[in-house]
Image: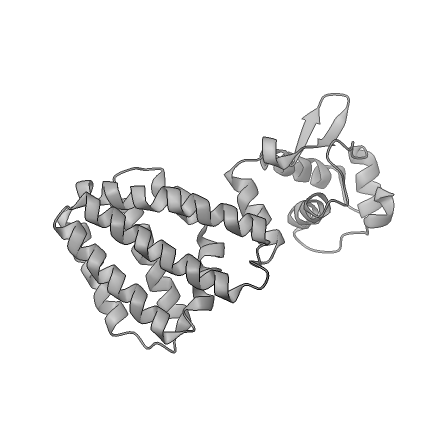
Amino acid sequence: MLSQLLEPIKTDSLKDVFVVRFEELILSGKVKIGQKLPSERELALQLGVSRPVVHEGLVELASRGLVSLKPRSGAVVNDYRKEGSITMLSSLIQYQKGKLEPELLDSLLQMRMLMEPEFARFAAINRTEDQVREFNEIVKNEESADYKNIQNITDLDFEFHLLIAVASGNAVFPLLLNSFRQVYTNISGQFFKDSQVISTVHKHHRDMVRALEAQDAKKAVSIMKTLLNHGEKYLRKMIPGD
């Protein structure tokens, strides 16, 4: 019974906790696709919150593609694979606390291999001189970085890839990459614990900067594919059962 899964909410940010709780119920499968949720009044009573909190929470869930709100029928749980948006991806990542199931990890790696070589291609064509200076500054910071400071190494790596997306000249590319920031940095932070991995990645970054300076799109794509394949190969060794 759904009522047995719900306990009164006791927190200051009631709507946010309502949303997180229902995300977990839906993503875990405890609340099934197609299931009709209780009325706003019933949910408010069960959770010990006001109806406006419930209403705002359901509207937020609907914006993420998790439920549909139907007049006089209430909220019905969606198949988020068909109804979800990029916001849903963030919800999935947050739900799994950065520890991705093999299927989702495979999907993310496949999408990254499709997207980032194209980011690099357009960056080589469209980059500005100011952006070239920014790339060189990142590389300089990487060369002088303490390999024991994994957080700094991870942040610089994401900054490098994000700048490639920005330099592409496409307004959507960096937004897409930013949507993966949490899982991206979580994963890269794991394999940057190996100093040999850091050295290899930084070498590829230097090669990439030279290709971007020369506006060699073919070379930039090749380097990005090599970089991504290197990362995926290392991840496969790290993740049991993958």
Q: Say which quarter of the image contains residue 202.
A: bottom left
On screen, 183 above or below 26?
A: below
Q: Is residue 127 left or right of residue 5?
A: left
Q: Say which quarter of the image contains residue 205.
A: bottom left
In terms of depth relative to the viewer, which is nearer, 194 or 97? 194
Q: Is residue 68 left or right of residue 74?
A: left
The percent position of residue 171, horizontal first and vertical second, equals 32, 37
On screen, 120 above or below 55?
A: below
On screen, 146 above or below 115?
A: below
The percent position of residue 50, horizontal first and vertical second, equals 76, 41
Name the quarter where the N terminus is drawn.
Answer: top right
Q: Is residue 184 left or right of residue 8?
A: left
In terms of depth relative to the viewer, which is nearer, 65 or 17? 65
Q: Tell me the residue at 51%/45% (across/down).
A: 107
Q: How is the image coloured?
A: one colour
The percent position of residue 87, horizontal first and vertical second, equals 53, 41
How many numbered marks appear? 0
Q: Tell me the residue at 24%/71% (across/down).
A: 143
On screen, 239 above or below 73?
A: below
In terms of depth relative to the viewer, which is nearer, 45 or 235? 235
Q: Say whether residue 134 is visible.
A: no
Q: Say which quarter of the image contains residue 158.
A: bottom left
Name the quarter where the C terminus is drawn.
Answer: bottom right
In terms of depth relative to the viewer, which is nearer, 48 or 159? 159
Q: Say whether residue 185 is visible.
A: yes
The percent position of residue 92, horizontal first and vertical second, equals 59, 48
Q: Is residue 201 left or right of residue 177?
A: left
Q: Tell me the residue at 19%/51% (across/down).
A: 131
